[in-house]
């Protein structure tokens, strides 16, 4: 019985020592394992923050920051953020740390090893700024290319419509009287003034050229608001609803061809001369030149 009783007695101190070690390991450390003296560990952001930025300078003379502002790595307050200066040191100017009395304030450089919160913010913000810059550059280049295409399209349309939108003949027509329009049409069509408009339906090549010139309508802004088939229809007395319907049939059916067929069916005696007069009134010298090929 003696040896058996001595066994538990010998095991008692070992178990007690083991329990003390476990408690020592489980006890939270008061100083940070990640940050320097004047910093604290932010467990939410996983980075080191500045004690000065969080708590401000020491509020009382001859006080300094406690180590890690009195915070442990779990964010718990284990000490007051400020403490009195050690013997022989003073802090009359509310610096972060005390310095020898009468020796002036000494600068303290905290060489912490943890990742600073400012560095974490910079690491996050830098890619975002780069993405925004690249996106802005892409949008700018897209807008620039689109602007160039629009300018090229306007130049092409201007040259396509010819003198109807910019030549001196256009200004001459627009400032002439109705008799002047007829004289201009007769000058362009000396042998066609009395011929029927129905002939144009048989001259397919000339008709196709006129369709290309007169059917397209001006783009947004009206920079090239030249006379179109819609304006010709108004000259012949057709309502705007008819023109809208005729244009709705594009591209399977030409509005100009439909207009000519409508005018010929309503007034078979309509002449090419009257058609040329309307073109002159609209300032379409280019169409008059095409129409003159029938002579």
Image (cartoon, rainbow, N blue to C red):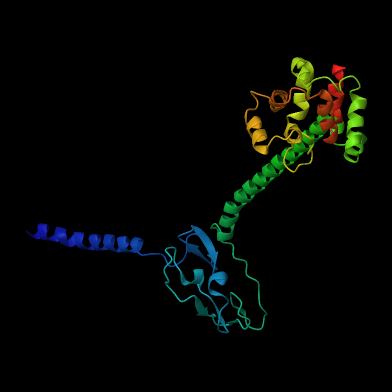
* Residue 68 visible: yes
Q: Residue at x 63, y 51 (%)?
A: 129
Left or right of residue 36: residue 137:
right
In this view of the protein, which residue sits in the foreground, 152 or 90?
152
Q: Residue furthest left?
A: 1
Residue sitting nearer the eye, 252 or 60: 252
Say which quarter of the image contains residue 155: top right
State the image quarter where residue 75 is shown.
Answer: bottom left
Where is the N terminus found, in terms of image quarters? bottom left
- x 88%, y 39%: residue: 174
| Quadrant containing the C terminus in the rendered view | top right
For the question of whether residue 36 can be seen, the reply is no
**How far from the left and from the top, in percent, is residue 184?**
91, 30
Left or right position of 260 against 8 = right
Q: Is residue 147 above or below residue 69?
A: above
| Left or right relative to 132: residue 208 | right
Q: Percent position (x, y) of residue 33? A: 47, 60
Instruction: Decide if residue 217 is on the left or right side of residue 289.
Output: left
Residue 78 appears in which quarter of the rendering?
bottom left
Residue 225 in the image, given as x and y percentages of width and height: 78, 39
Viewer-side residue, 152 vs 40: 152
């Amino acid at each position: 019985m003696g040896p058996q009783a001595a066994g538990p007695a010998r095991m008692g101190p070992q178990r007690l020592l083991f329990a003390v070690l476990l408690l020592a390991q489980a006890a939270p450390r008061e100083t940070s394992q990640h940050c320097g003296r004047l910093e604290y560990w932010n467990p939410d952001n996983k980075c080191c923050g500045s004690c000065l930025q969080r708590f401000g300078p020491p509020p009382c003379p001859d006080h300094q920051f406690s180590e890690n502002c009195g915070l442990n790595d779990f964010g718990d307050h284990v000490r007051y953020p400020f403490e009195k200066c050690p013997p022989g040191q003073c802090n009359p100017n509310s610096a972060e740390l005390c310095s020898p009395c009468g020796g002036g304030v000494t600068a303290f450089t905290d060489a912490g090893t943890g990742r600073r919160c400012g560095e974490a913010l910079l690491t996050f913000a830098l890619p975002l700024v780069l993405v925004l810059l690249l996106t802005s550059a892409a949008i700018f280049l897209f807008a620039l290319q689109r602007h160039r295409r629009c300018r090229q399209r306007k130049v092409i349309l201007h040259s396509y419509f010819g003198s109807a939108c910019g030549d001196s003949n256009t200004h001459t027509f627009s400032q002439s009287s109705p008799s002047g329009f007829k004289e201009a049409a007769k000058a362009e069509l000396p042998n066609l003034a009395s011929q029927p408009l129905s002939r144009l339906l048989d001259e397919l090549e000339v008709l196709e050229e006129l369709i290309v010139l007169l059917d397209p309508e001006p783009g947004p802004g009206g920079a090239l608001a030249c006379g179109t088939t819609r304006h010709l229809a108004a000259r012949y007395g057709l309502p705007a609803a008819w023109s809208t319907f005729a244009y709705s049939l594009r591209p399977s059916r030409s509005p100009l061809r439909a207009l000519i067929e409508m005018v010929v069916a309503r007034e078979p005696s309509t002449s090419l001369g009257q058609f040329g007069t309307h073109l002159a009134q609209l300032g379409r010298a280019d169409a008059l030149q095409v129409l003159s090929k029938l002579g």
